[in-house]
Amino acid sequence: MADARGLVKRRAGARLWLSAGWLVLLVLVALFAPLLAPQDPLMQDLFAARLPPFWASGADPNFPLGTDSLGRDVLSRIMYGARVALSVALIAGILTCVIGSVLGLIAGYFRGWPDVVISRLVDIWMAFPPVLFSILLIAVMGTGLGSIIIAVVVIDWTRFARVIRAEAMSQGAMDYVASAQVSGRKRFSIMLTEILPNVMPTIVVLLTLEMGIAVIVEAILSFVNLSISTDDPTWGSMIAEGRLSIHQAWWVLVFPLIALFLTVLSLSQLGEGLKDRFDPVLR
Amino acid sequence: MSFLTIENLNARVGTAPILRDVSLSVEAGEVRGLVGESGAGKSMIGKAVLGTLPTAVEIESGRIVLDGEDLQALKPRDRRRVIGAKAALIPQDPLTALNPSRRVGPQITNRLVDILGWTRADAGHRAAELLDEVSIPDPERVMRAYPHELSGGMRQRILIASAFAAEPKLIIADEPTTALDVTVQKQILRLIRQMQARHGTALLFVTHDLGVVSKVCQSLTVLFGGMVLEDTRVEQFFARPGHPYSAALLAATPKYTDPDASLTPVPDAVIAGVEAEIEAHDRMHGHV
């Protein structure tokens, strides 16, 4: 029993460290992209178009992961693309989390009319198809980083609101909440000091999942050319461009895809790992 | 003047009445039992007094007067302040009554800081004294522990200490021993009784166990279907129960002296009688 537990713990630890490692690396690369990138991500050189990655014959060591059909360096573009992906993940993820969790907590703990209003709003909101909804939003607001972030928040706050409402409801029925109420404290302060710490593990997991979703939404939007200006490299636009030349230069498509995949996977694994850290019973 | 007076309290969920003209009073320093089978509304009365009723329950009419203050007439914020200063709760399930993600110490001292305006340090000393008073070994260590690290009996002791912390004049104990095993039950009952006597607190003891009532209470109120059937002194109840249902309830209590005797249920005729009473009451008040 103790051994099995230790094993589970060690595995969870490895998962946590691997995913955190990838994310830290990504953050550093994004921060220092101008220093680290081997090439200007926007510089085109048609004589160096579709160079293969470093291990293939005919590769140029100046372009370690090859070049796209306009001769732009894939590695540099991935590095700069990480900036967009991470800003969207962080800002959109946190905003979504805060708005959705606050509404969910209020609905789940206060019940009554706030719950009716918020829950109906969530129901109506979730009836919109999310991708169409976001494309519509971007069409109205225009492209740009701000619009993408707003689109993610507007679409996804319902995910938090729903789950956190249910959690807050089950915590709110516990006797410790009744005891806190009897000691004459304000309901809002009870919500923050008694309920919030107990739904925190769930919030953390949702937040990391949401960051992954934000990265994907950004990629989807740049895939359909609705992200930020077409000049700036994003993973989604790289994938979209790579798709056109997949038979001649698969690396243009595959490398940004790998970056996207690892990032989203790391975020969700990080969430699972952090959940255990936040839970006093498992800690 | 009684410390707690409930007058003609009516409450309902949707259209279904759950409390029917409930009146009862608890004198200062008195221990009153509130007895009834599950669903009789006994916990609801405690929750109504403490202002922790589920939102689905609506109080229709009646007054709850706590130490001269009519709770229904107060604004919600003032009501919470009054209740917080004068009353406290010993909850039913010690496993859910402490916040699992916070250490035990702050959960006791919070009441002192919130209600009496003490400093954290003073409250900490007092909490340690209280834990000592409820026979918890090494209070300092326990205060740093998380609830899941402690046993059910320990947690119930902590909750008792915490209920008495701010020296309330009334404590509502909502089946405080139901979730504990029998040996621990006995200790906890004795502890509640001791603490009550030492602090001179009035106690409203919600229970379905007449054995507990006979050991702890001085007077009791018998409830069925949200209606008060009998309100009497304990000695008189056990000698001469004043309502057929009370008598049947008493007869249904298993006896240690005759462990082989089969259990006597409350006879159907008695239940039918009480239900007829309830129906008559509802007709009179326009619920059908």
Image (cartoon, helix red, strand yellow):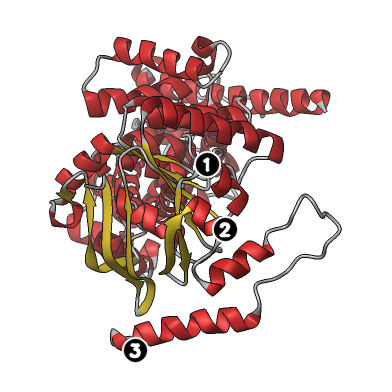
Other-residue count near label 2 (Cα within 10 Å), few / some / many at <14 / 14–19 / ≥20:
few
Q: Kindly state the secondary structure of the residue where label 1 is placed.
A: helix
Rendered view: A21 above or below B279:
above
Q: Residue A189 location in percent, x, y?
A: 27, 37
**Mark 1 — residue?**
B216
**Which marked residue is nearer to the observer: mark 2 or mark 1?**
2
Amino acid beneath label 1:
Val
Query: Measuring 27% from the left and 23% from the top, which residue is drawn there?
Result: B113
Drawn side of residue B129 relative to residue A232, left or right: right
Q: Kindly state the secondary structure of the residue where label 3 is placed.
A: helix
**Mark 3 — residue?**
B283
- Chain letter for mark 3: B
Drawn side of residue B15 relative to residue A186, left or right: right
**Mark 2 — residue?**
B239
Spatial CA span between label 2 and label 1: 17 Å
Drawn side of residue A94 relative to residue A239, left or right: left
Disc nearer the start of the sequence (3/2): 2
The reply to whether residue A89 is visible in this rendering is no
**Which marked residue is nearer to the observer: mark 1 or mark 3?**
1
Q: Residue B50 location in percent, x, y?
A: 32, 48
